[in-house]
Amino acid sequence: MVRRDPGDRAELVHELLRHFGQRGWTGALRLLGTDGQGREMLTFLDGHVPWQSPADRASSAESLAGVARLVRRFHDLTAGMPLAGDQEVACDNDISPKNTIYRDAGEGMRPVAFIDWTRQRRAPASTT
């Protein structure tokens, strides 16, 4: 389990993580609640996060295709939800190798989940 202080957009992030959990998506952490000190309690996802060098084992064409599949599923899961506002889907605004967990199941590093949802924003209301 991971414990961390909630960010500025904690309510929004919690809504999103609960939504993913209710739909059984394994591409994101699970929100377990908050502790007595007000910290978020999240599941720990084992794997490799390429913090300094995105090309250090996670830059194959297969890994890129895996990221595209994760993004597609994220968008499918947020289509039409209140978080997307009047937009088609919600957007993360910070998907990158340093916010992606990779694992090697014998065929090289493949993305399995996104982390760091703190840049998530509510979609603005349309002005048209």
Image (spheres, rainbow, N blue to C red):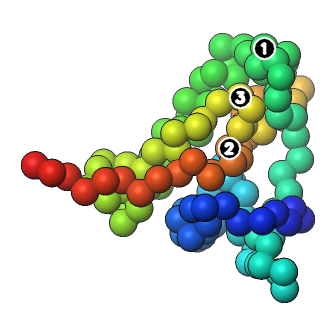
Mark 3 and mark 2 residues within 8 Å of each other at the beta carbon: no
Q: Amino acid at mark 1?
A: Ala
* Residue appearing at x 55%, y 30% in the figure: 68
Res. 55 mark: 1
CA distance for labels 2 and 1: 17 Å
Q: Is residue 13 left or right of residue 46?
A: left
Residue 24 appearing in the image? no
Report the residue marked by disc 2: 114
Seen at 84% across and 51% down, the residue is: 45
- Up/down of 110 relative to 38, above or below: above
At label 2, the amino acid type is Phe
Q: In the rendered view, does 51 fall on the left or right side of 88?
A: right
Answer few, some or many: residues within 10 Å of disc 2's Cα (few below 14, many 20 plus, some between 14 and 19). many
> Could you tell which of marks 3 and 1 lies nearer the N-terminus?
1
Vertical position of residue 17 compared to residue 36: above or below: above
**Residue 122 visible at all:** yes
Q: What is the distance, in whole Å, between disc 3 and disc 2 at their CAs?
A: 9 Å
Residue 36 in the image: state x and y as whole percent: 84, 85
Q: Residue visible at 81% across and 18% down? A: 53
As rendered, which of 101 and 5 lies closer to the eye? 5
Residue indicated by mark 3? 97
Tell which circle, 3 or 2, labels the residue nearer the N-terminal end.
3
Residue 78 at x, y percent in the picture: 44, 55
Rendered view: 8 above or below 105: below
